[in-house]
Image: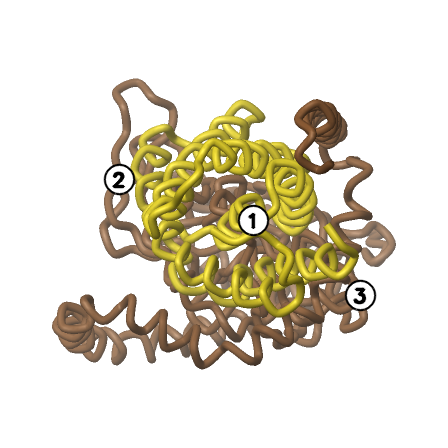
Chain colours: A brown, B yellow
Amino acid sequence: MFRDSRRVRQLLGLMILTSITLITVDYRGGDNSPFRGLRRSAGNLFGPVERAVSSAVRPVGNALSALGNVGNADRDAKRLRAELAAIEGQSRLNDNMKRQYDDAMRLLNLLNEGQYRSLAAHVIAVAPSNFSYTVTLDKGSAAGVRANQPVVNANGLVGRVMEVSKFNATVLLAIDLKSKVAGQLSYTGQRGLVEGNGPNRMKFEVTPADTTVVAGQAVVTAGSLFAPAVPIGKVVESRSAPGAPSRTVVIEPYVNFSKLDLVAVIIKQEHPTGPDVLVPSDAPKPVPSSSIPPCPTPAPQARSSAGTAASADPSTGVEPTAPERETLAEPPTVPCLGSMPATTAPGVSAGLSP
Amino acid sequence: MTGGRIFLVFLWVVTAIAVQGALLSRVTLLGPRPDLVLVVVLSIAFYDGPLAGAVTGFAAGLSVDLLSDHVVGVGALVLCIAGWATGTVRDYYDRFSATTPIVIVGVASAAATLLLGALLKLLGEPIAWSRLAADIPRIALYDAVLTPFVFAAVAALNRRVDPAVRQW
């Protein structure tokens, strides 16, 4: 009875029609697709099974992935030895730079401590498809994971949370073809978009096209989604077509995406995370108007000192604009403290007069 | 198809999806991975004919769609057609050598992956043809290598649960 070809054909036609309807509905729905809830339930349903299988086969999986990398071991050892030598020299320099960086950060109070916390999670499954690069984590909304939160591991950026169910979360890896992350060059701060390219190296589109890019330079995250600069990868090569507005940089990710296991979800505690946006690095920070103390009349001292600074202007050229901009960037404190202008202004004018 | 067999097929598909996600995808995340779910669907189509193949393919494909990030329905469509086609082709054979299923699974894998890639590309996934061309032979090869093991396991369980099921 099951071999009745007419009935088989009818059922086959029905299922093909259903598939095409599903494709149409999901495709047209985009982000508001009615299947989002169903995806979440599927995650909930398969989560426990995958967790069980994952914990049972983790040693086997690790052994197998080690087996896949065995051919590279010798070459890796040579390369690592050379890199270590270079890094040892670099690290002395870096210690000093790190101290300066820490001081600067503390001074600027840019990194609000306690604003972020990280949540450790294990990768329990990888997408069962050859065309998507996502992983499933063993932590979900019950542990505080929300959509769009960045995921990192010890080496750098892994991706961002795409879908959350109660006890699981799906992470869109940074190498997925759909992944786009705001990045910047670590030395110059030039910004651009880092795009995943599947198993190939990532692409980093940076503007303008004449940006200097050096091989080996690090690319880190930029923008509001990833507050601390999370390392993404290092520059391998860069090229730009004549007349193109941007330069395409090929970067090698720091994270080994074939061996993902322990990762951390970065949870921003106070403000809900929004989509990542490209903000020019020198854009003035918005200051909430209520926090600025009223500043009725500037002290006469301040006015006169400002006058001397202005009179010193023509002799030195355009130099004074820089200190002026810095005082503008922090309007609430400096001009309104009263005693401050008296102490700073002579310093400024003394510095300007030759 | 008895109730016990339907349950067995369901169990097979769930196991295949879990093992695919937890083990096989971990082995070579970069580059193509063997498609265990497809091989299991084809093995069921082989034993139970085109209808069972199509229904199992549809259900398994839909599950894979919901667990991946691509458009829902694509995997269901491809696996449904692959299951039906394999079951139909199998009916034209009277006798089998041990290599017949291996060859059929290899060819079906290549065709299914090509169809899946082409459909996803049509729906806007940035998949390069060159990558498809490089990946398809490897996926087909991996799946062909998996075939004897999956078929042997399915046959062993079949004999235990439902001795009436046809053998090859």
Disc 1 marks which amino acid?
Tyr
| Mark nearer the viewer, 1 or 3 | 1
Number of marks in picture:
3
Local crowd size for mark 3, using a 10 Å CA cut-off: few (<14), some (14–19), many (≥20):
some
| Mark 2 and mark 3: Cα distance apart in space | 42 Å
From the image, tell me which residue sits under label 3.
A166
Residue beneath disc 2: A238
Label 3 element class: loop
Task: List x then y, in percent, for residue A340.
Answer: 66, 66
Q: Provide the secondary structure element on which disc 1 rests.
A: helix
Above-or-below relation of A111 to A16: below
Say which quadrant the N terminus of chain A sits in. top right
Closest to the observer, B75 or B149: B149
Under tag 2, what secondary structure?
strand
Say few, some or many: other residues with alpha carbon within 10 Å of mark 2 (under 14 / 14 to 19 / 20 or more).
some
- Residue at coordinates 39% horizontally, 53% vertically from top-left? A219
Mark 2 vs 1: CB contact within 8 A: no
Compute the Cα span from label 1 to label 3: 38 Å
Q: Do callouts 2 and 3 point to residues on the same chain? A: yes
How much space separates mark 2 and mark 1, taking CA atoms? 54 Å
Q: Mark 2 or mark 1, which is nearer to you? A: 1
Position of B154 with respect to B14 (left or right) is: left
User: Label 3 marks which chain's residue?
Assistant: A
**Amino acid type, mark 2:** Ser
Residue A106: quarter of image: bottom right
Task: Check disc 1 and report the residue beneath it.
Answer: B47
Q: Chain of mark 2?
A: A
